[in-house]
Structure formats: C-alpha cells, structure tokens
Image (cartoon, grey):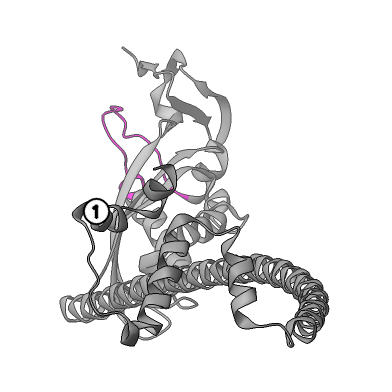
Amino acid sequence: MLGFRYAKASPTTYLIQYRNGVPVREGAGFAFFYFAPNASLVSIPLESVDAPFMFREVSADFQEVTVQGQVTYRVADPKLLASLMDFTLTADGAGYVSEDPAKLPQRVVNAVQVRLRAALQGRELADLLRDSARLVGAVRDGLRAPDGLPALGLELVSFAILAIKPTPETARALEATVRERILEAADDALYRRRNAAIEQERAIKENELRTEIAVETKKREIRETQMDAERAVLAKRLQIQAQDLQGRIAQERETETLTELRSANARREADARAYGLAALVNTISGVDPRVLQALSLGSADPGTVIAAAFQDLAQNAGHIGELNISPDLLRQLTRPTNAIAKG
C-alpha cells in the first residue's frame, strides 16, 4: 500500500523508528504505521535472557577445573545497546539484518569468562571446591561494575555457579586426601575418646581411693575413740582397783592392829591365867594329893567317882584277892554319863 506498513511491538520489546538516520519514535509496546522507503526500525528485546556457560580454567595452584553455571541478564539501556550493536529489522520486519542479536549472549558469556578467570587465578582448587560463594560474589561484582555489563547497556539479573569440577585424577587425589583426613580425624576422635575414658577411669579410681582413705581415716578415728574410751574405762577401773587396794590395805592394817590387840589381850589373859595357875600350884604344892582328889570328887559326876574308885582298886590290886562285879553294876557302868547322872 504505497510503501506504508504497520509495526506493532510487544511490551517487552523496545522499538525505535529512524527516519533519514534520525530517531523519530521510540518506546516499548508501540503500534504505528510508518513509511518504509525512508524509515528503518530497530527492535531490542527487553525480557531477561538465560545464558548457560561451561569453562575450563586453571586455579592458582595450576589445577585444571571445569566451571559450569548460568548468567541471566536484561537490557537496561536500549539506546546504548542499539548504538553498539545492530538490531535493525529487515524490510518485512520478520528478522534482523545482522547477526549481532544472536551474538549478544556470547558476548555476555565472554564477559563472564573474563571475570571468572580473574577470580580463579587468585584462589586454589581446594578453596574453590570448599567455598564457591566467594567466587560467585567476585564474578557478580565484576559484571555489575561500570566496565562490565552496564557498558553494553545490560543489567545483571542473576549469576549462579552450578558446579566446579576438577579433573578425574585430581578428584580422586582430593578424595584420597579427604578420606585420609577423615580417617585421621576418626582416629583422633577414637584416641580422644580413649583418653577421656582413661581419664574418667582414673578419676573414678582416685575417687574410690579417696573414699577408701576417708573410710580408713574414719575407722582409725573410731578405733582411736574406742581406745580412748577403753583407756578411760581402764584408768577408771585401775583407779577403782587402787581405791579398793587402798581400802584393803587400810582394812589389813586395821586387821593387823586388831590382831595385835587380840594377841596382846590373849597374851595378857594367858599371863593372867598362868599367874593364877602358878599361884594355885604354889598354894596346893604342899597338900596331899589324896586330899586334893577327895576335894575334887566332891563336885564330880558319878562316873568320875566310879572311875576314881576303880583307880583305887587298881592301885591296891595286890591286896585284893577276888573282885566280883554284878551285872547291874556293869550295866550301870556302861551307860552314858548323863544316864548315870540321871540314875
């Protein structure tokens, strides 16, 4: 229709209309008619784009490592990007006149590789495998720097590292090293547990020994207390025995004094009787024995009198021819003295 065409852009597409090399209309989501012979359209997509990447780089300790991840970006300054790359549409509006739009993700990936290589050269492999968050932060900061994606009119939406893998030989070596470290840590833990068990057992034995010492000390105190009590009882018993002995000594002394007094009294009584007997003997020493016998018979019992009579008979046996004793007299003589006296 006489060179007029209709252009319609989606809300995620920034459209710029140039007429004779001068931008006359631009914006997102435009819909308008334009005269094709003297106009050109530049279409820049504004939606976010995911660009996966996988690089083989070398770490600071000269170990080859494979880094796999994804960067997501979007156009922040369409006019700047349009001035750097060709996003001009074909005359029918079905495609681009150049391959620059298809090269944009690779250019972003190249920028990522540059920042990633700079970050990898300052870190060793073990550090990269252990802490990839620092690497992500360093690359993200580099891409957001003024000389990064903003220099292309782009904005970083997100950046993520999905995997960092060393070579298979290095991985096996690291696994062996880590395995040995884990085994060593396990041995150290076992050693510490054994030491702890030994320390606990020693503490238990020390507690048992202290308990036994305390028990023996208490037993010794009990024995000493018992010995003190026994000593006190023995001392009391010895004191009682000493007092008893003193009492016995005093009693024996009193008995000795009493015995001496009794002996003296008995001696005096014997002396008195001896003196009286001597006086009696002196008195009767000149008297005829027969007179004395007769005097004694006066108060004697019948048996004594009969005995004295037989004594006289015996003394005069030479003058007696025959002596007859009747049975009554003999029976009377054999009776007890009391019975004779009663008869």
Q: Nearer the viewer, residue 332 or 101?
A: 332
Residue labelled with disc 1: 331
Residue 39 lies, with reference to residue 242, above or below; the image says: above
Q: Is 279 left or right of 288, judged from the image as shown? A: right
Predominant secondary structure, magenta span: loop
Q: What residue type is labelled 1?
A: Arg
Provide residue 263's location: percent of width, then percent of height: 77, 79
Provide residue 7's location: percent of width, then percent of height: 38, 18
Q: Nearer the viewer, residue 57 or 26?
A: 57
What SS does tag 1 mark? Answer: helix
Provide residue 322's location: percent of width, then percent of height: 22, 75
Q: Is 300 left or right of 91, judged from the image as shown? A: right
Residue segment shown in magenta: 85-102
Mark 1 nearby-residue class (10 Å; few <14, some 14–19, many ≥20): few
Residue 281 lies, with reference to residue 185, above or below; the image says: below
Q: Which of the image's four quarters has the C terminus? A: top left
Image point 48% across, 70% down: which residue? 212
Q: Nearer the viewer, residue 215 or 269?
A: 269
Q: Is residue 192 visible?
A: no
Image point 34% across, 84% down: which residue? 319
